[in-house]
Image (cartoon, coloured by chain):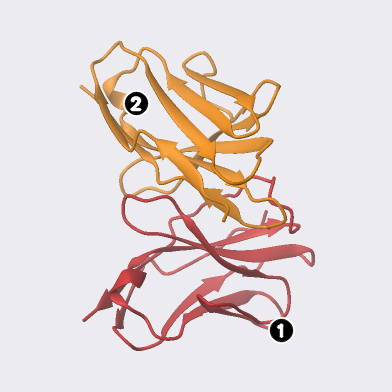
Amino acid sequence: GAVVSQHPSWVICKSGTSVKIECRSLDFQATTMFWYRQFPKQSLMLMATSNEGSKATYEQGVEKDKFLINHASLTLSTLTVTSAHPEDSSFYICSAPGQGSVALHFGNGTRLTVT
Amino acid sequence: DAKTTQPTSMDCAEGRAANLPCNHSTISGNEYVYWYRQIHSQGPQYIIHGLKNNETNEMASLIITEDRKSSTLILPHATLRDTAVYYCIVRLGAGNNRKLIWGLGTSLAVNP
């Protein structure tokens, strides 16, 4: 149980375009989801906390107008990278707290490459 | 949340026990120790957590020193599939809605 599905697993896009990444909790409801970014050989950096039915909370230094987060239902959060640039190329990972569990459950990540 | 210190990398022979240390000398009384691992190009996976007592589950054992300033994650019979980066995280409370502060972890290589 407590599976988090992330889609797509990889995407290549041209500079200036937008990319949407989906994060779904398959067998549980998640009022909160977390979005991370990870550059090669670096650790996970929390970008924002997605809250169902309300605005996301962004970490310091993360542009909310560039990284749009929508959490419209209890099982789906989306991250849209707008006007992507090569420096946005990274590994994006979502997670959700499991119900009745202290663990965070993670998606398998999305490898974004902006050319 | 308290800062943790882990060795950058470790090696282990397949079938042997892998003992991964973590120092958290500034841990406070109500902070828990969590362990996650991340296999290459995948999302992290929860392993185990504890407060004071040693813990064991189907994946690993967690040994926490009496003064709680350090802990060791033990994989009793490491396999090649255990090759991953292991993160030790200390955080307040057992609830899962607080953000985790990730360090660089220990890169464990299990060798045949």
The residue lying furthest to the right in this view is B29
Q: Residue at x 27, y 23 (%)?
A: A86
Look at label 2 and name its amino acid. Answer: Asp
- On screen, residue A15 versus residue A97, left or right, reads left
The residue lying furthest to the bottom in this view is B16
Q: Residue at x 33, y 35 (%)?
A: A90
| Residue B66, disc | 1
Q: Colour of chain A?
A: orange
- On screen, residue B68 versus residue A71, left or right, reads right
- On screen, residue B92 versus residue B58, left or right, reads right
Q: Which chain is the one coloured red?
A: B
Q: Mark 2 to mark 1: distance in Å?
A: 44 Å
Name the secondary structure under disc 1: loop
Q: Position of residue B33 (x, y in %)?
A: 64, 66
| Residue A66, disc | none
Q: Nearer the viewer, residue A16 or A62?
A: A16
On what subunit does the disc labeled 2 rest? A
Name the secondary structure under disc 2: helix
Q: Could you tell me if residue B107 is visible in this image? A: yes
Look at label 1 and name its amino acid. Answer: Glu
Q: Residue at x 26, y 15 (%)?
A: A15
Q: Could you tell me if residue B27 is visible in this image? A: no
Q: Position of residue B106 (x, y in %)?
A: 40, 66
Q: Quadrant of the C terminus of chain B?
A: bottom left
Q: Residue at x 70, y 21 (%)?
A: A54
Q: Position of residue B74 (x, y in %)?
A: 49, 81
On what subunit does the disc labeled 1 rest? B
Q: Residues within 10 Å of mark 2 (few under 14, many from 20)?
A: some
Q: Nearer the viewer, residue A82 or B106?
A: A82
Mark 2 on the same chain as mark 1: no
Q: Position of residue A2 (x, y in %)?
A: 57, 52
